[in-house]
């Protein structure tokens, strides 16, 4: 790099600084988007759990009687009511297998549980929220869940857009006869050869 003219050195330094700024900014945007999506999804699950608990308080009101859309899309979400012992008493949605493990069920009897796991009948990993329907010790448990496919697709799309900087720099081949940093050769004009020495 010491053989480069001062303009070339400044160009490389500027390009390297911009690459770092873009990388840090991109990471911040990605993490912020992930946090916002997770917060929104959890709030939606809490609202669904409230709706399921309300239905569970009416023994004659099955989950299928819920207003369409309240419990989410059937092929991407699920809701269930379990007895205090963990036996399924009512269910709605696309889940076709156990919704929670034994350890999570025990925890749900004491506090709200939020887990991410694979559930049969749901195409991708799902986030599930479980808690007691009421404060009574013999209260049934309510479990609601949502596929993470939409969230993951949104994050993947954001990640792909943020990789444009790496594709941009990869278009420029390293300069022949010089030692460039990993950023590669990204000057605004072709790399200038070192001027010949005067005899």
Image (cartoon, grey):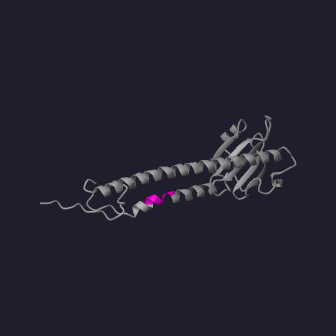
Which residue is farthest left?
199
Query: Is there any visible trace of residue 95 in the rendered image?
Result: no
The x, y position of residue 70, in whole percent, is 77, 53
Left or right of 21: which side holds 91?
right
Q: Nearer the viewer, residue 102 or 104?
A: 104
* Quadrant in which the N terminus appears: bottom left
Left or right of 155: which side holds 42?
right
Residue 51 in the image: above or below residue 161: above
Left or right of 199: which side holds 177?
right
Residue at image position (60%, 57%) is 154
Which residue is farthest right?
60
> For the magenta stretch, what is the residue range?
162-166
Residue at image position (43%, 51%) is 20
Residue at image position (81%, 53%) is 66
Q: Nearer the viewer, residue 179 or 63?
A: 179
The x, y position of residue 24, in whole percent, is 48, 49
Q: Nearer the viewer, residue 79 or 25?
A: 25
């Amino acid at each position: 790099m010491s053989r480069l003219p001062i303009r070339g050195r400044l160009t490389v330094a500027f390009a390297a600084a911009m690459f770092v700024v873009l990388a840090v900014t991109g990471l911040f945007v990605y993490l912020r988007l992930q946090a916002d999506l997770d917060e929104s999804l959890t709030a939606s699950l809490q609202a669904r759990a409230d709706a399921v608990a309300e239905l569970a308080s009416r023994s004659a009101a099955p989950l299928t009687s819920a207003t369409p859309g309240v419990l989410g899309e059937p092929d991407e979400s699920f809701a269930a009511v379990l007895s205090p012992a963990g036996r399924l008493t009512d269910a709605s949605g696309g889940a076709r297998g156990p919704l929670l493990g034994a350890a999570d069920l025990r925890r749900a009897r004491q506090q709200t549980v939020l887990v991410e796991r694979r559930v049969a009948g749901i195409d991708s990993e799902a986030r599930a929220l479980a808690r007691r329907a009421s404060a009574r010790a013999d209260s049934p448990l309510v479990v609601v869940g949502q596929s993470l496919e939409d969230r993951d697709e949104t994050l993947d799309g954001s990640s792909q857009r943020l990789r444009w900087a790496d594709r941009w720099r990869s278009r420029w081949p390293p300069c022949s006869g010089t030692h460039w940093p990993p950023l590669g050769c990204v000057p605004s004009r072709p790399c200038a050869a070192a001027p010949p020495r005067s005899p």
